[in-house]
Amino acid sequence: MSRTDAESVRGVEPVEPLGGLGVAMAATLKRDLTLAARRRSDIMNPLAFFALVITLFPLGISPQPALLATIAPGLLWVAALLATLLSLEALFRADYEDGSLEQLLLAPQPLPALVLGKVCVHWLMTGLPLALMAPLLGLLLALPAESYLVLSLSLALGSISLSLIGAIGAALTVGLSRGGVLLSLLVLPLNIPVLIFGTGAVQAAIIGDPVGPHLAILGALCCAALMMAPFAIAASLRISING
């Protein structure tokens, strides 16, 4: 008699193979992608906000190309950060309201892995489009063409950290009726290093300095967030749901 049969005879559930976690993460990704496709306004609002901020800023400051090119890296990164924050409040809100978040906490698979799948969908729907959209808006700010690739790379890499760090705040405030302001206060200080080195990478590309060190630090921040943030998100969700 095999081990699985023996466990079944004794009334003990057999241990699931490691593939069960992969199936659960794939199901989470598929479900969240389907829901995101149905709620298109949640995807378009951050992108529209990002485009409006960049479009209106030259009208309020100055249309001079030299001035716009100087402030463009910081402006693009700050606008991307605020657009990401705009979409974070809804990350767990719908699941909390329909009760599926409680089921997620009761799932046999590790909660940090499941929430990592949800954050991945958030990045695919928000961070990646912002990174692809940024060079087009850089034209409005007279950003030099040689910095476009670095701008996209830095935003794509840095927005992973923004989504992971922001998800911690979203998990802590998911049970609050108006947690948007508190979410911003919790998350913004933690995002300052990403903002500094992301802006520094674009500025280095403009003046011709090496961009490798800035991108390397962004990558290190991304790796650190990938290792630690899922556990912090899971703990925050348990605090919010279980009190």
Image: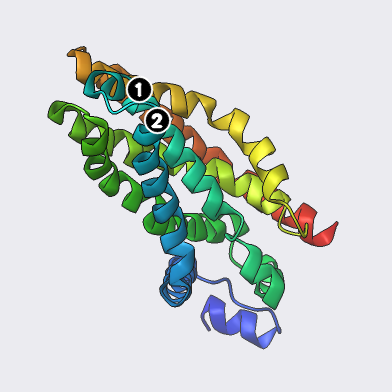
Q: Is residue 178 visible?
A: yes
Name the one closer to the observer, 116 or 131: 131
Name the one closer to the observer, 103 or 132: 132
Label 1: state its secondary structure.
Answer: helix
Report, in whole angstroms, how far the alpha carbon at label 1 lies from the one at label 2: 6 Å
Q: Is residue 103 left or right of residue 198?
A: right
Residue extending farthest bottom? 9
Q: Is residue 20 above or below residue 148?
A: below
Q: Quadrant of residue 142?
A: top left
Question: Residue 211 bears which disc, if any?
Answer: none
Q: Image point 68% across, 73% down: which residue? A: 103
User: Is the residue under label 2 in contact with that under label 1 (CB below 8 Å)?
Assistant: yes
Q: Is residue 118 left or right of residue 231?
A: left
Name the one closer to the observer, 234 or 206: 206
Spot occupied by residue 234 in the image (x, y as percentages of width and height): 65, 53
Q: Is residue 133 above or below residue 74?
A: below
Q: Quadrant of residue 155?
A: top left
Question: Residue 71 bears which disc, if any?
Answer: 1
Question: Residue 75 bears which disc, if any?
Answer: 2
Q: What is the count of numbered marks?
A: 2
Q: Image point 53% across, 26% down: which residue? A: 192
Q: Image point 82% across, 60% down: which residue? A: 242
Label 2: state its secondary structure.
Answer: helix
